[in-house]
Amino acid sequence: MKPASWEGVYRDGRDLYTANRTPGTKVYGEALATAEGVEYRSWDPFRSKLAALLLKGAPPDILGRPRTVLYLGAAHGTTASHLSDLWPEATIFAIEKSPTSFAPLLALARHRPGLVPILADAQLPERYQADVGPVDLLYQDVAQRNQAGIFTENARACLVPGGRGILMLKVRSVTQQRPTAAVVREARAALTAARLKVTFETALTPFSREHVALALVA
Ligand SMILES: C[S@@+](CC[C@H](N)C(=O)[O-])C[C@H]1O[C@@H](n2cnc3c(N)ncnc32)[C@H](O)[C@@H]1O
């Protein structure tokens, strides 16, 4: 097990790992590995688009070292659990609108201090803005038509100047008709108009055929 380019992430061959904050416990059936007395959780790029983004050549500073994170579309907490491994001291506000997904997220958070689930619609940041406050990292993974709009509204509400963002753009949720390049171009234009600078872009193939990841700085 060797440190990878991104702080807190480890590599064994081609596989990524994070140090397990709750040793002996899996979150989504991932493999566990122990090296020199430390237990690591395998970070599956087919289950977590963030692991896919790292493997697609994301620069080392793509995530920064946030103290506060706003995560939109946390679902059961697969990716959020790895963020909680990466930054045990950080507060990670995890927004999820589906009550069915929220229940396991809540259960996960019981064993992971700093992970704060909020049952809310990411399209209405004004409902949680006061509870969340300013954040250093905004992460979004919601399959909605207006994904860029949701991102810019949440950035306006919560992201500090100089803060970082990751948008997992599901192209086919925006439109079934237009080509991927046009959808990405439009999303980038909306982000730029909101004074968010795109620093890295990649398709997530072969891990996800439907997503393009965009990294941003406010
Ligand atoms: C692909 S899943 C997220 C997977 C998760 N990010 C991970 O990597 O572990 C998308 C999630 O976004 C949630 N979602 C969709 N629209 C939303 C909205 N407007 N507000 C909050 N959550 C939303 C869905 O309920 C679903 O759980």
Image (cartoon, helix red, strand yellow):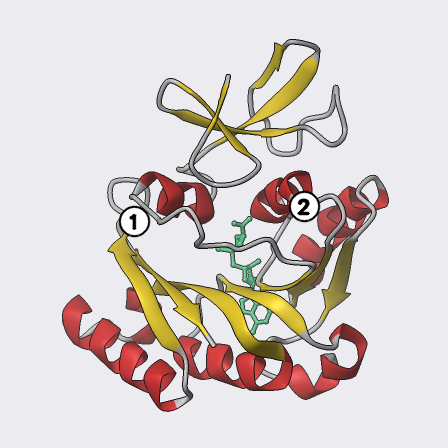
- Residue under label 2: 87
**Residue type at the position of mark 1:** Leu
Q: What is the C-alpha distance between the residues marked 2 and 1?
A: 24 Å
**Residue type at the position of mark 2:** Trp
Q: Residue drawn 44% across and 66% down?
A: 143
Q: Position of residue 133 (x, y in %)?
A: 74, 77
- Residue under label 1: 204
Q: Is residue 145 visible?
A: no
Local secondary structure at mark 2 = loop
Q: In the figure, 168 relative to 53: above or below?
A: below
Q: Is residue 21 visible?
A: yes
- Residue situated in front as seen by the camera: 138 or 148: 138
- Residue situated in front as seen by the camera: 73 or 188: 188
Q: Position of residue 108 (x, y in %)?
A: 76, 43
**Closer to the camera: disc 2 or disc 1?**
2
How many other residues sit within 10 Å of disc 1, few (<14), some (14-19) or many (≥20)? many
Q: Is mark 1 within 8 Å of ligand 1?
A: no
